[in-house]
Amino acid sequence: MQKTEQKFYELADSLLRESGLLANRPSWINLRQLVHEFLPDLLDTDCRSHTYAILLVLLRNPEKSPERAKKLAAIIESACKSSPDELFIDMLRQLAPDDLTSTLLPQIYCTDSRGSIAVYLAAKIGLHVEPDAFQYFLTARTWQQTDLINLAFLVRPSEQLKVSTILEQAAANESSAINREIFTEFRHILFGEPPQQPLLPDIAIAASSGTVITPAPTINEDVSEDPPEVNTTARKGSSHRAQAFSSRVAPTTDAKGKKDSPGFSASILKIIETNQSALLVLFVITTIFLVATGLSKWFVSDSAESVTPPANAGKLPSHWTDSATREKITERYLAADKDYRMGELYLTRDRFSEALILFEDALSIRPDHTLALYRAGYCRLHIKDYAGARTALEKALKIDPTLRYANLLLARAAAAQLDNKGAESHFNRELELAKDPVVAEEFANFLHNTGKEVEAESLINKYQALYPDRILILTRKPDKSEKEEQRQ
Amino acid sequence: MKKSGMSLLEIVISISIAVVIFIPAMNMFSTTGQAVFKTRNFSFANSAARRISQRLMAMPYEDIVEVPLPGIALFDAPAESFFAPFLNTSGTNSGAKNITQADMPEFYSYLVQHDFRYSLSVSNVSFGDGDEIKSVGILITWSENNKNMMYRLYVYVPSL
Amino acid sequence: MYRHYKRKSDRFGVTLVEIIVASAILAFIGGIVGHWFFLQREYQGRIFAISDAQQTIRQASWRMMQELRTARSVLFPRINADKSIRSDSKVVFKSFAGDVICYYYLASEKEIRRCKIPNGPGVPTADSEPVARNVDQLAFTASDEGNRIIDIFMEVKGTFGLESVYLINE
């Protein structure tokens, strides 16, 4: 097998030395026969160089086959990672324009060294592209001066003006200053004094002195007269011409510096320029963040322990907030409350007149003191001031319609004044507030004594059903003759 | 250059809105927290009022007198008030401690911070023959978030 | 034809610029959320501590007050000979049932414990469970001449509790 491989390389070398189209060269037939007969799968992944790899693809795959395009694209992509040699460039020249368009040109978009090498190769083999393609190439990535010069070789001389016009129009419509500058730069290069040959990219110079994959020793031996010389010449020429060609390019001390600094700053400028609105929003977010931080700190510090006393410590405030009811408490409120509580004390001994005075005192301070109004009504009822009682209790109910027992007292006052209809109404309202069996029993007895036995029975039965554990009874009010008998 | 999906600006705006929503959410949480702090003060006021009410039961009837607003501070309180002396781990009067910065710094700080005070609103009613009742309103006041708070507890103390 | 090539550069979906800006936004949002959570965690911790402290004070006070209120007499602490108040970390009293009960504070364990002291010879028997845990300070003070009132002062994690018990059976 090794012998067959050896024979392949020998025949391939002969083929490469011969002139004319590949298929017309004398060694082509022999090599093709060898590949098809003895090397169906061999050397697929183990070729000595990219040149042989391309040759192998051409020998094995018919023109325009997808397999051929796919394999060529992979080889070219790999080849663009290293410094190209003349043998490889010669091999590329043997490829059909269609093959190159679909394999080499896409590499130009690569932002790394592949892009630079691809432009160089395209320029070197004299590939031309359509005028409207350049605006896309130029905006796709950041461009080194050398690459721009090489890109200019891809413009047909007859189409320079057209390309320039297209770029001028594109620049007018372009929002990015960076892109506008690139378009202008390229137009200057087009109409400037062009170099005779494409310039080897700086990255390739650096790579060739370092980690680049060199062709197999046998090839190098065979073609040693050409590639090293070409490379050397190109390298020397590159720095010369690049400097002479454009005064805009800042001179740099080494290739690495040349690569990094302009690209990085341009990227930063591009980021800022194209994301102005985003940066503005970022600024807003930052402000919100700071405000949020401040607010959250304020909330925490608000509750944090501080040893300093409050500003109004020891001073008499205008009002307090009741911690249980949230009522507003003033000194007047407290004074009224004090009178009210004193009145309550008198009530514990059934001293209604004294209590009434205190409740009235409380009401003179706070006329809306509901409980004082209720108690004043209660006291007046007991001292038989029914009209006064009704007034006080109605006021209390006006303030708080749900006040318990105020309606009951009103009913009693009305009954005492022989206002049976009014009494009934108040009894009913009281029972609406709460189904109190004591109130119900009193109401039933009132009805019974006023001659409404049926209603009284009905009510008592209703409440007896509601409260089966209680005994609710109807008692009849003694009439005049009975009272006299009792006295006797 | 046409892009699919949301634009960067849209994302940034939606995030800004989300951040703005955070602030009221934070406020809501903080309000809950403040309620806990308020409950602490309320509980303390409640316990202080109960302490006074219990003392009122044991003290001489005639000694129950009005303490007008703004009241007596629980800290640095004058001698023989409800909160002074406060502690005494010794066997004599000389070892008595008050709620002062020196004797009880942490408790003192808490009381000073909220300016806890007490007042008594006393109403005396005499029914003759030495039968008297005092209605005592125990008012505990304090300051909370620049608000003057009051806790009221009413007790009746009979003379007999 | 070349527009086709152009699309090739968009194949990754996002550009470096977008990634950088998105990272910056995420950093800001992360900062906001992180800071907010940090503050809230701290705040929440304090709230829980206060809430727990209040609960501890309430439970311990309630339990001690219930038993003290119905006690027959307080044996210790009692008012000093010079009629000044007397405080201690323990209270000993004769309960309504006639048992001698002691509530005491263990500073090393930060616990309030209860034990029953036999009337005659024998050793006190302590309850298996403490009355309260995490108590920083406890003092029982006899503050009236009749030894009918015991004041309780308690501190749990910066929260203070005051109680007074009036012995109704004294």
Image (cartoon, rainbow, N blue to C red):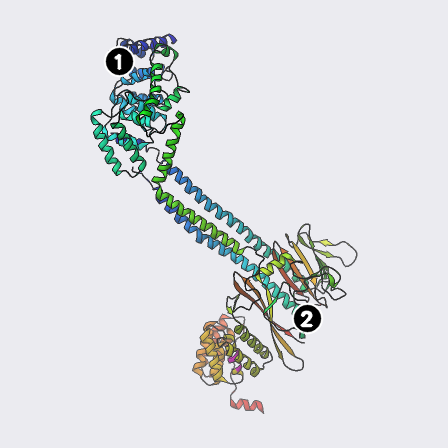
Relative depth, front residue between C77 and A437: C77
Report if residue C6 is visible in the image. no
Task: Identify the residue at the far right of this view.
Answer: C121
Judging depth in this view, the residue of A259 and A380 nearest the camera is A259
Q: Residue A244: horizontal and vertical position, in percent?
A: 32, 25
- Asked whether B106 or A430 is in front, the reply is B106
Q: How many marks?
A: 2
Chain under numbered label 1: A
| Chain letter of disc 2 in the image | B
Which residue is denoted by mark 2 in the rendering?
A: B59
Query: In which quadrant will I find the C terminus of chain C?
Result: bottom right
Find residue A158 and report its horizontal and vertical position in percent.
Answer: 20, 25
Rendered location of residue A462, percent (x, y): 47, 73
Magenta segment, prevailing SS (helix, strand or loop)? helix
- A29, above or below A306, in the image: above
The residue stretch that appears in magenta: A374-379
| Residue B64 on image: x %, y % | 65, 73
Checking the image for residue A126, the label placed there is none
- Which-is-in-front pick, marks 1 and 2? 1
**Disc 1 element:** helix
Image height of A243 relative to C44, above or below = above
Residue A18 in view here: yes
Please tell me which residue is depicted at 45% across the width and 49% down the height of the picture. A290
Label 2: few (<14), some or many (≥20) within 10 Å? Answer: few
Residues A242 and B46: in front is A242
Q: Is residue C47 above or below residue A167?
A: below
Q: Is residue A377 on the magenta stretch?
A: yes
SS assignment at label 2: loop
Q: Amino acid at mark 1?
A: Leu
Disc 1 packing (10 Å; few <14; some 14–19; many ≥20): some
Residue matched to label 1: A22
Q: Amino acid at mark 2?
A: Met
